[in-house]
Amino acid sequence: MKRQTLLQVVIFSFVLVLMSGISFALQYRATRASQHTQEAHLGALSLDIPEAFGTPRTYRDQAWDVREYRGAGLGTLRIATEPSDGSPWEETCRRWFDLEQFPAGAASYTSRGVRWFFKPVPVLGPAAYVLRKQGKPVRFIAFFEREGLRYWIGLDTRDPFTAHKQLFDRMVLSLRTPDGARPGPELAAALKPIAWEGRYRFVQPAAVLLAIPLVAILLISVIQALIRWRAGRLPAETIISSATPVFAEGGLELGLVRPLQRKFMDCAVRVTQEGLEVRTFGTPFMVIPRGSWRGPVEIGQAWLGLPFVQLVLDQPPAFRKWAWAYRAMKGPLTLRIYTRNADRLRALLQS
């Protein structure tokens, strides 16, 4: 494995492990919160909410009687009731949720810079499941009327993932009347496809945190593979025999090493009667005349297992391109060519 490849593997693995950890933490926090619940009262109704929300702060907002809970990592939960003013249910929803017309099924729309999802659902009376998104935060809303009262259950969260939707859905499904009546199974069936019906614009699986960098890494890897292939390819005209031994190999890695400086690149190498020629992208990058290196040509073994040929130069080589980028590479300079044919390359350089 080449050093550049290893470095990419280490960086990409770190990113994937980090995003996997964040994804797991978000799901675990919401799932664990659902395992320990407390009873909360909503007018004459009651529902189960996570104990992590703690005790509520109660206040009045016009005609609304509000109970507000805050849960670390979960968001802000508000449950509230107000007397109905007698307006038709459809008209109330149109006014409160910026609907142009009341939909028969699920609907996604944008109004005044805010993205909405609205779906009529059966709770304990006329009801709607609403998602409101402005920026990153999402508000989950269950809104319904029953026996002259309006009921509101709303969860504001900055982590709009499926685990948080499931947490909210469990609270809605746990609603019950004093005589024990609960929403029917048709409510659970209506809530299940909402993330998909909203085209995952409002609610996403936590795995998306892993999928996004994975796609980016794949794209970067493909682009870099193409670039490195072009950088290390060996033009056909370089494979020409002559009276002297010739070494021509592409897809190699070149290392330029000096104290506190290391540069690596993909290249093609050719040994001619005049000396060593290194090419990148099909054109000469540097030329090292025979006899210009100090001492014998050495062979080493990289800790990655790939052998290399090593030359020590008292003066930097003659760079044929990108010389401005290598001005700081002063002598003495160690040049390493990583190749599986290290023995043959050394023999030709010493011949």
Image (cartoon, helix red, strand yellow):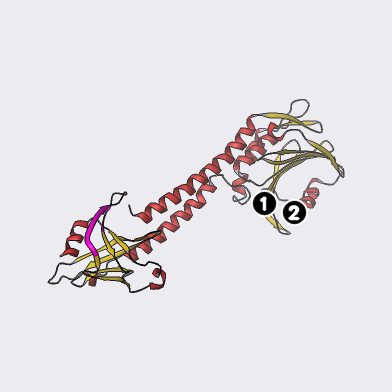
Residue type marked 1: Ala
User: Where, by quadrant of the figure, is residue 329 drawn?
Assistant: bottom left
User: Which contiguous range is marked in magenta?
Assistant: 294-309
Residue furthest top in the image: 179
Residue under pointer 2:
99
SS state under label 2 = loop
For the residues labelled 1 and 2, say whether their Cβ atoms are less than 8 Å apart.
yes
Q: In the rendered picture of this protein, how many numbered marks are placed on residues? A: 2
Residue type marked 2: Leu
Say left or right for 22 vs 314.
Answer: right
Report the residue at 53% width, 42% height from top: 21
The answer to whether residue 335 is visible is yes
Quadrant including the C terminus: bottom left
Dominant secondary structure of the residues highlighted in magenta in the image: strand
Indicate which disc residue 147 carries: none
Residue 190 part of the magenta segment = no
From what the image shows, is residue 12 above or below residue 33?
below
Residue 298 part of the magenta segment = yes
Q: Position of residue 287 (x, y in %)?
A: 28, 71
Q: Position of residue 185 (x, y in %)?
A: 65, 33
Residue under pointer 1:
107
Which is nearer the eye, 69 or 337? 337
Report the residue at 63% width, 41% height from top: 164
